[in-house]
Amino acid sequence: MKKTEHDYQIQHQKRLSYMPWLYDSLKPQHKAWVIKWQSQIQSNLQELETITVGEHCFIAPEAVLLAEPGRTIALGANNRIAAHVFIHGPIHTGEHVSLNVGVHMDGGNQGIHIGSHTRIGAHAHLFAFDHQFAPHELVRKQGVRSVGIFIGEDVWIGAQAGITDGCKLGDHCIIGMGAVVTSDIPDWAIAAGIPARIIGDRRDPKFKTQVLAMNQTLQKKP
């Protein structure tokens, strides 16, 4: 059976949902219907939940955003939210924040605050609450505490990383793939491991030389 224009649009919607960065390079023939599609998704969300969405955002229809009263989700302009992301407020993001496939974030009572230009890799988990676990009583009966998570600007959190309640990540830091952050990370630091520890600094001349060499190698590949 010959495929229709609608069939191709459905497939392109799926491509955008799983690779939302493609939204920034849409061809003119796609842009009009994609903007209309996104407007419907975002309007529906804002009618049903306490959510505000900045201009030029992309939210995959497969993403789940839950924000009952008192747990507001506020998305800055140009955010990109991929398929199977789960967000439970309170959560506030700056501009140009991207959440890749399967990111899971729960703001607890105190919330998650994410600075502008931050990238969060696939299947990363951020929980702004923690169970209390005194030995004299069942964990399920003790409730939870919440301090909040604060992430600076221009942060890169690698795929499958975990950020625990009470952590503050400084501007420009990098969290390695699969790391579990249990304490504060300063500006510009590179952290990896379980629990995460600082292994470098983005401003270190040695690190800059390594990155430059890697980029040059990649550019030479066919």
Image (cartoon, rainbow, N blue to C red):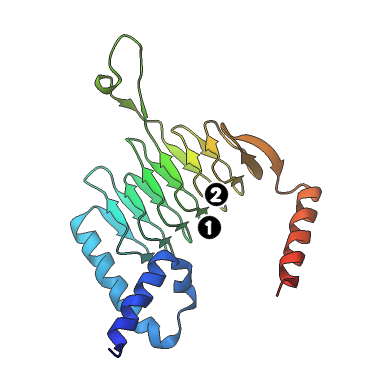
- Residue flagged by tag 2: what amino acid is it? Gly
Q: CA distance from mark 1 to mark 2?
A: 14 Å
In the orientation shown, which residue stands out farthest toward the bottom?
2
Q: Which residue is mark 2?
A: 158
Q: What residue appears at the point 47 percent right and 53 percent down from the top-left corner? A: 122
Residue 174 point in image, percent of width and height? 61, 47
- Residue flagged by tag 1: what amino acid is it? His
Residue 91 point in image, percent of width and height? 36, 47
Q: Which residue is mark 1?
A: 117
Q: Residues within 10 Å of mark 2 (few under 14, many from 20)?
A: many
> In the image, is 140 to the left or to the right of 205?
left
Q: Is residue 18 visible?
A: yes
In the orientation shown, which residue stands out farthest toward the front?
1
| Quadrant of the snapshot with the C terminus | bottom right
Where is residue 145, by image quadrant?
top left
Q: Is residue 192 above or below residue 34?
A: above
Residue 196 point in image, percent of width and height? 59, 35
Q: Is residue 56 visible?
A: no
Where is residue 38, by image quadrant?
bottom left
The answer to whether the residues at label 1 and label 2 have Cβ atoms under 8 Å apart is no
Q: Residues within 10 Å of mark 1 (few under 14, many from 20)?
A: some
